[in-house]
Amino acid sequence: MATSITKAQAGEGRRGPSRPDGDGAGRRRGALLHRLDVKGAPYAFVAPFFVVFAAFSFYPLVYTSWISLHRVELATLDVMEWVAFDNYVDLWNDSRFWNALANTFTIGVISTVPQLLMALGLAHLLNYRMRGSLFFRIASLVPYATSVGAAALVFTMLFERDFGMINWVFGLVGLDPVDWEADKWPAQAAISTIVIWRWTGYNALLYLAAMQAIPADRYEAAAIDGASRWRQFTNVTVPGIRSTIVFTIVLSTIGATQLFGEPLIFGQGPNGVTGGADNQYQTLGLLLYEEGWKNYQMGRSATVAWAMFLLLVLVLVTQRLIERLRSRTS
């Protein structure tokens, strides 16, 4: 009898005490929560961005495309008349659209090319060890931190025809005053000056950050080979920040396409909306505003907005194709 009890106790010791079925369910529940945490946490972290994007970017984009297919007035937004693609056909045949597109292109070129070249040179200077480099880096961001309204207002006073400082300097050297607002090319040059002043420092800091990521041994190897500072800049620095240069070109192209505040304030009144008396500096952004908030034609305004969007898509696709062809040839 004692032997059987001892064997039973020994067998129970080998098997261990029996556990309730709830422990297995708890382990399965913990494993499920772990899998949800590992796989679902990234989606939970990025969900706020997609919610905000859907509410403030995707929905307005879709709704604008729907409005562009209707005849809608600003006073009666709830009354829509279906016109299909008539707004796009009218826009294609509108000389004001092609004029605004040409002005947007010329102002974009006049402002973007000098801006990026100056930013590249400024970043190259700031990349060297120099006294007060931190001060100059902070100072280069001051124009970017200045509001577009304040900057455009100051430059408008500088380019004023009768009492502006620019014409005053011209008078000191014997040059005739320039009517910056009335003539096409002077007006576009003045507006481009505002854009250059605001964005050169910002792009310079982008280039500077990319330059500081280039390994120093590349410059040391180039110096050992006898390369001058200029050869180091063209053969080491520029190829090393090529992706950043492409990024700033795309960013500047988007900004030039959406140019609005500078020409609006430069016009100093009703001419600001129309881009001058002869639309000599009216951009696509100003045309959009004129159609929607001056002519009260929200359908045509939405059509201009979609034309701007499609133009940016075309530019981005072209840039990607060029990069792909370049990567294949290299």
Image (tube, rainbow, N blue to C red):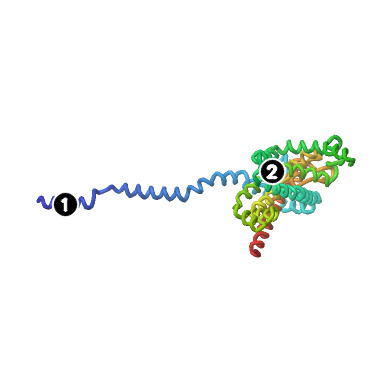
Q: Which amino acid does label 2 sit on?
A: Gly
Q: Which residue is drawn at 82% across and 42% down?
A: 276
Q: Residues within 10 Å of mark 1 (few under 14, many from 20)?
A: few
Location of residue 162 by image quarter: top right
Q: In the displayed orientation, state which residue is furthest to the left.
A: 1
Q: Distance between the residues labelled 2 and 1?
A: 86 Å
Q: Can see residue 131?
A: yes
Where does label 2 land, which residue? 201
Query: Measured from the top left, where is residue 300 in percent x and y?
Result: 74, 47
Q: Which sits in the foreground, 53 or 126?
A: 126
Q: Which residue is drawn at 80% across and 37% down?
A: 158
Describe residue 296's horizontal placement relative to residue 225 as left or right: right
Query: Measured from the top left, where is residue 152 in percent x and y?
Result: 75, 38
Q: Of helix, strand and loop, which one carries label 2?
A: helix
Where is the C terminus found, in terms of image quarters? Answer: bottom right
Q: Can see residue 297?
A: no
Query: Measured from the top left, where is residue 116 in percent x and y?
Result: 71, 49
User: Which label sits in the foreground, 2 or 1?
Assistant: 2
Where does label 1 land, which residue? 8
Q: Which amino acid does label 1 sit on?
A: Ala
Q: In the displayed orientation, state which residue is furthest to the bottom.
A: 329
